[in-house]
Image (cartoon, rainbow, N blue to C red):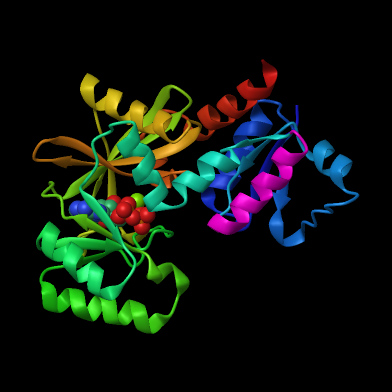
Amino acid sequence: MRLGIAYDRLRYEEKELFNAAQKSGYNPVMVYLGELTVDLTEGQRKLKETASVVLQRCVSHVRGLHVAAAFENVGVKTVNSYKVSSLCGDKMLTSLALAKAKVPTPRTLVTFSPEQTLNALDALGYPAVIKPVVGSWGRLVTRVRDREEAMSQIEAREAAGDSMNQVYYVQEFIKRPERDLRVIVAGDEIVASIYRYQPGGDWRTNVARGGRAETAKLSGGEMETIIRAAHAVGGGVLGVDAMEGPDGLVVHEVNGTVEFRGAASVSDTNIPNKIVQYAASLVKR
Ligand SMILES: Nc1ncnc2c1ncn2[C@@H]1O[C@H](COP(=O)(O)OP(=O)(O)O)[C@@H](O)[C@H]1O
Ligand SMILES: [Mg+2]
């Protein structure tokens, strides 16, 4: 067994995954994309011999997808798979998968022009949330309180000229407590559940923005919703994010390259070990 860890930026998580794999005797191999050449014509065997299974841990969505495609092409399983990563890396694709599986989600509209975005916001009502379809750490996730704020947001996005801003992901603002839920799932198992409390001065709860982690105890129904969300995107090692709305839990995001520093700081479970065991189980069978 050789467990590969493909990464573009070495974070706490990748180091911990390496340590956990080493402790279990899975011979971890760090695959740093900055020093990787994928030889598409002659390098198939070399790539295949790199690892028996690869944890795809890239911060960059696009890099992660491409390295997963390269490994899968030579028959090396990646966690998560190309398919799952591609769904989770794009909020619209995730929402489509969740809606299809009838997992409760916030009402969401997608538009492709500034004018239609204003119409969509009028239909949802204010406050509402605009998000980039690709992104994380709460970056550019914006709450707009009225039409005037919406117009200036849309103007700024248009001026930035980024192609990702040509797709507007517009969502109802969920009246939730000052926290949301981050649940780490591996296969069919809930590994850890935490609340993330929004820091002072921000309405977003991301740990990367200073959100404070606290252990959460989920009800049976909540656990079922979370597992259904994980299955809806194809399963694997996932960070399911949900909010406690007025009508129960709504899932707003499923992260394909889950950060767990916040969760590990309060959870009794050895999260990296669970992830590594799950990856190993895919090739041991
Ligand atoms: N519709 C919403 N209503 C209320 N809060 C939201 C909503 N969408 C996002 N948030 C808050 O913003 C944070 C970041 O949004 P999210 O969709 O998870 O984007 P990212 O991928 O950047 O983490 C969430 O964790 C939550 O705290
Ligand atoms: Mg999130």
Q: Residue at x 39, y 45 (%)?
A: 94
Q: Name the residue furthest bottom.
A: 159
Q: Image height check: is 24 above or below 152?
A: above
Residue sitting nearer the eye, 177 or 12: 177
Q: Image height check: is 127 above or below 18?
A: below
> Quarter of the image containing the N terminus?
top right
Q: Residue at x 43, y 80 (%)?
A: 161
> Quarter of the image containing the C terminus?
top right
Q: Image height check: is 1 above or below 67?
A: above
Residue 146 lies left or right of residue 93; in this view the side is left
Q: Name the residue furthest top.
A: 285
Residue sitting nearer the eye, 153 or 256: 153
Q: Position of residue 124 (x, y in %)?
A: 13, 57
Magenta stretch secondary structure, dominant: helix
Q: Name the residue furthest right.
A: 42
> Would residue 205 be seen by someone viewing this image from the given angle?
no
Q: Which residues are magenta?
A: 59-75
Residue 125 lies left or right of residue 29; in this view the side is left
Q: Residue at x 28, y 28 (%)?
A: 225
> Would residue 123 be seen by someone viewing this image from the given angle?
yes
Q: Residue at x 43, y 46 (%)?
A: 261
Q: Position of residue 112 (x, y in %)?
A: 34, 67
